[in-house]
Image (cartoon, grey):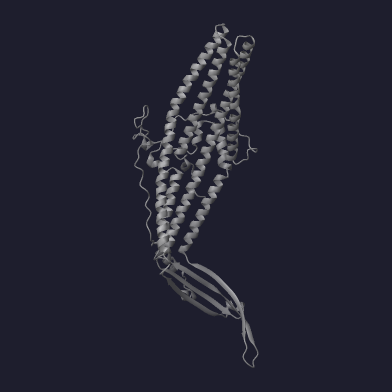
Amino acid sequence: MLAALARGVPLAPVFAGIALVQAGCAVGPDYKAPAAPTATVYDTSNGVEGEKEIKPAAEQAPNARDVEAQWWALFSSSRLNETMRLAIAQSPTLPAARKTLEAAYEAIAVARAGYLPRINAVAGAQRGGTQLPGLPEQSGTTWSGGLSASYSLNALGGSTRRFVEEQQANADYYRYQLAAAYLTLTGNVAIQALTSAAVRLQIEATKELIADDEKNLALTQREFEAGAAARTDVLTAASQLAADEANLPSLYQQLDVARHALAVLVGKAPGEWEVPAFELADFRLPAALPLSLPAVLVRQRPDVLSAEAELRAGSAAIGVAVAQEFPSISLTGSFTRQALTAADLFHDFERLWSAGGTVTQPLFQGGALRAQVREARDTFDAQAALYEQTVLQAFQQVADSLRAVEHDSARVAAYRRSLKIAEESLVLQRKSYAAGKTTVLQLIDAERTYSQAKLGSATADASQLEDAVNLFVALGGGWWNAQVAEPR
């Protein structure tokens, strides 16, 4: 081969042919994707009263609503939209995941380099001399320059092809990890924004309760001093006031935690960014929620896709391990020029070339090669089990979210009925008190009942919105429509 180089014959076609032979042969199992899930429902009723199967209608399945890229916009909150924009643009989690993905693509390029020969330029200078008896010493410098080439021909084992396949699967894994980071980020922003809004409303309602408690305590104290009430009535009113006041610090702490979390999610320290004052009234429950078929879900969830990418990498790793048991063929060669001066290398020179090859067949490795193959197969089997578990957990999360949304509807309706009744009762108590037919204690009690119903209704509304967010996240969050994990 190097003789051909010495005669000026290009070796690129030779190496390309060898690469094609090598790429076309690989040992180990060819990867087969897991079968699509056979489940058609997310949850059965199992005879539970009032519950039915959660299943996308067959006639709706072909036109099932996809998860939009900016699904959070369906909640109609301009503050949430702006906060989400800042988080996607500024959060360090996405650039970190993207750079990891880019590094994985570079690893593919490194692996593919194994298909091609390695060619290096070599140059050197060596000074030496001889001295015969009775003669002056003869010394000089020999200059050399040329090329050396080497190539590992593993066509018999195909380890390079399997190694490239493994690196491609690893890149897909990090691609889906980027999608998972995007899904986690957007889901957390929405949840923290809703938490902030819900806690603000709870603080407002708790303050109303405290105001009612203070009026109740003051009135009870006056009646006690006038001899119209017992000391135990005063203590009961004071105890209720203290209990409601004790709730405020924990609510403020919850609000601070949500605010701080939102700041970090948008890539800011808590003291560097003023968190929007989210109000629960700014959010609207989407009119229609998406619902993917189980077979579609496994192609949308980043965690499921990541688990499958690991499975593909594990399958390729078996081939890499098996290839180590096959012969390894290495080709080497060099072509150099030698002259007494550096300038003569381009004119008067001596040409030297060499070419050769070696074949290495493992004979005894202490059982290490067979153990590596068994290890790779065991790892693949473990990854297959983890994939199945990931799919089951995905179905569970969707089923939980769907049931939560279903139960939230009934809960919200019940709390709204309770709020309406409390509101009507308060109106009647105010009219009755103005007419002198009821006592102020009865009016204060009606005000307190209304405040409690208002707090319960707000909590139910917030839970319904949060469960809707959880459903969007459980279905994959629309990252494929946002093209967030496309390589750049």
* Residue 301 point in image, percent of width and height: 44, 43
* Residue 93 point in image, percent of width and height: 55, 45
Q: Nearer the viewer, residue 442 or 303?
A: 442
Q: Residue furthest front?
A: 231
Is residue 182 rendered to the left or right of residue 370? right
Identity of the residue drawn at 52% across and 39% down: 186
Asked if residue 65 shows in the view, the reply is no
* Residue 302 point in image, percent of width and height: 46, 44
Identity of the residue drawn at 51% across and 14% down: 425
Instruction: Determine whether 432 is above or below 321 in the image.
Output: above
Is residue 242 rendered to the left or right of residue 306? right
Locate residue 143: give its quadrant: bottom right
Identity of the residue drawn at 55% across and 20% down: 451
Is residue 209 rendered to the left or right of residue 21? right
Instruction: Determine whether 350 is above or below 176 in the image.
Output: below
* Residue 150 point in image, percent of width and height: 48, 70
Q: Quadrant of the N terminus?
A: bottom left
Asked if residue 48 shows in the view, the reply is yes
Q: Residue furthest bottom?
A: 134
How many numbered marks are there? Answer: 0
Locate residue 123: give its quadrant: bottom right
